[in-house]
Image (cartoon, grey):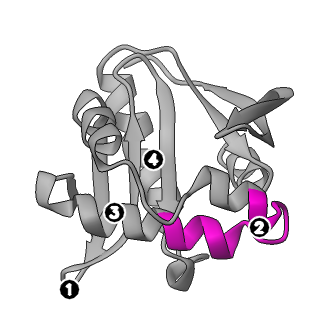
Amino acid sequence: MHLRPYRAEDLSTLTQLFHATVHTVTAAHYSPEQRAAWAPAEPDLERWRMKLAAEITVVAERAGEMLGFCSWTPEGYLDFLFVHHAHQGKGIARALCAEAERDLVVRGVARIHTQASVTAQPFFLRQGFVLVRHQTVKARGVELPNAVMGKRLPPA
């Protein structure tokens, strides 16, 4: 596995990975209605294009297959961290998260924070994040529980 910067031609594969992961990996914690609101069958590709262009996005791949991706802002907000459902538990999310942290340390950012799904909260706790608060957000009018989590980063 290696990490590389996101490229515009990755968009279709990335959005398919996102959709498949949300609809499989989070099924124990989110209803079909919640998953459909979070990851609709027809993604808004222009919204994705703009969001990914505004953030730092890294793709994990092996032999040309996208295994996962991570996206964060230069200020320290970890926006996306998703690993294909067939590749869970292999250290891919850990490697992607570590890459985001390394980048932010170099930028002099003191803290990384995210809004973690119920499914992802145990992963972030294992990476040293702490729970800031539980909250409910809305996606397409449907309520989704998640948690604000954060982690202090070491100085550069």
Labels 1 and 4: the sequence-earlier one = 1
Instruction: Please state the horizontal and vertical placement of residue 74, each as a whole percent of the image.
Output: 34, 21
Q: Say which amino acid is labelled 4.
A: Ala
Q: Residues within 10 Å of mark 2 (few under 14, many from 20)?
A: few
Labels 1 and 2: the sequence-earlier one = 2
Q: Is residue 105 left or right of residue 90?
A: left
Question: Element under label 4?
Answer: helix
The structure residue drawn at horizontal position 75% and vertical position 45%, both measured from the top left corner, is 125
Q: Give the mark toward the camera: 1 or 2.
A: 2
Labels 3 and 2: the sequence-earlier one = 3
Marks 4 & 2, CB-CB < 8 Å contact: no
The residue tagged 1 is 63
Question: Element under label 3?
Answer: helix
C-alpha gap between disc 4 and disc 2? 31 Å
Q: Residues within 10 Å of mark 1 (few under 14, many from 20)?
A: few
Labels 4 and 3: the sequence-earlier one = 3
Q: Say which amino acid is labelled 3.
A: Leu
Figure quadrant of the C terminus: top left
Q: Nearer the viewer, residue 23 or 82?
A: 23
User: Is residue 130 visible from the viewing direction of this image?
Assistant: no
Please tell me the numbered disc located at residue 14: 3
Figure quadrant of the N terminus: bottom left
C-alpha gap between disc 1 and disc 4? 21 Å
The residue tagged 2 is 32
Instruction: Please state the horizontal and vertical placement of residue 76, each as a whole percent of the image.
Output: 46, 22
